[in-house]
Image: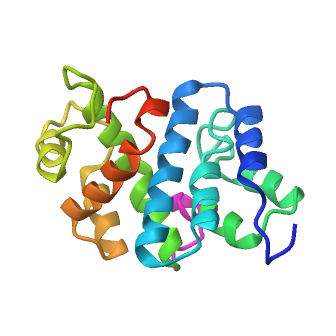
Amino acid sequence: MNGTTWPSRDDAWALVCEWTQNPNLRKHMLAVEAAMRAYARRFGEDEDLWGLVGLLHDLDYERYPSQEAGHPFRGVEHLRALGYPEVICRAILSHADYSGVARISRMEHALHACDDLTGFVIAVALVRPNRSLAGVDGPAVRRKMKDKAFARAVSRDELLHAAEALGVPFDEHVAVVVDALRGIAAELGLSA
């Protein structure tokens, strides 16, 4: 692998499947990949690169589910050993606030903004009677954000701050993510 050609998506997916058995965690990584690809298109960036970052960002989470256990450092260590480009490794490290790697690039900000929001949007869809993304939009997400018992591990302030750091109004950010997830709704176990 060299700096001009990214690792293949198939190889990255095989790596995800090797490291991650939990189907919901795999779905999360697919969701972030889809959202990152959508943002790459929106910003005129490299869709394959951004997609790989989204797909691989939680590679080690099942094995090392916390800062103390080594997430995301262990996964990045493995990616580096495989020859993955530093731009991918750095972006993955930047999504963890405690990593010491500040988010600088638009891609790094997009990863941070898409990570928790994809999970929150999916949670909103899953509590709908038809388990569907239909009707999930900025106002629907904001209503659920007011319910502190719903997806309580997700920081509402961080969702808003991440969109702001990306430079996208929150409701617009939700729309980008929801549209991206609709494209893979079947893989996520949802209706579009």
In this rendering, the answer to whether 105 lies above or below 190 is below
Do we see residue 44 in this rendering?
yes
Q: Quadrant of the N terminus?
A: bottom right
Tag count: 0
Q: Is residue 175 shown left or right of residue 103?
A: left
Q: Is residue 113 magenta?
A: no
Above or below — where is 122 with respect to 86? above
Q: Quadrant of the C terminus?
A: top left
How is the rendered protein coloured?
Answer: rainbow
**Coordinates of residue 29 in the picture (x, y in percent):** 55, 43
The quadrant in which residue 42 appears is bottom left
Along the line of sight, the residue nearer the viewer: 48 or 102: 48
State whether residue 151 appears in this view.
no
Question: Is 98 contained in the magenta span?
Answer: yes
The image quarter containing residue 17 is top right
Please name whichever residue, 83 or 156, is drawn nearer the observer in this view of the structure.
83
Residue at 68% of width from left, 42% of height from top?
A: 60
Q: Residue at x 59, y 41 (%)?
A: 66
37 on left or right of 148: right
Q: Whole-percent x and y of residue 106? A: 48, 76
Residue 99: give x, y in percent of width and height. 60, 62
The answer to whether residue 21 is left or right of residue 113 is right
The residue located at (20%, 26%) in the rendering is 128
Across and down, in percent, residue 133 comes to 27, 37
What's drawn in magenta, residue-wise?
A: 93-104
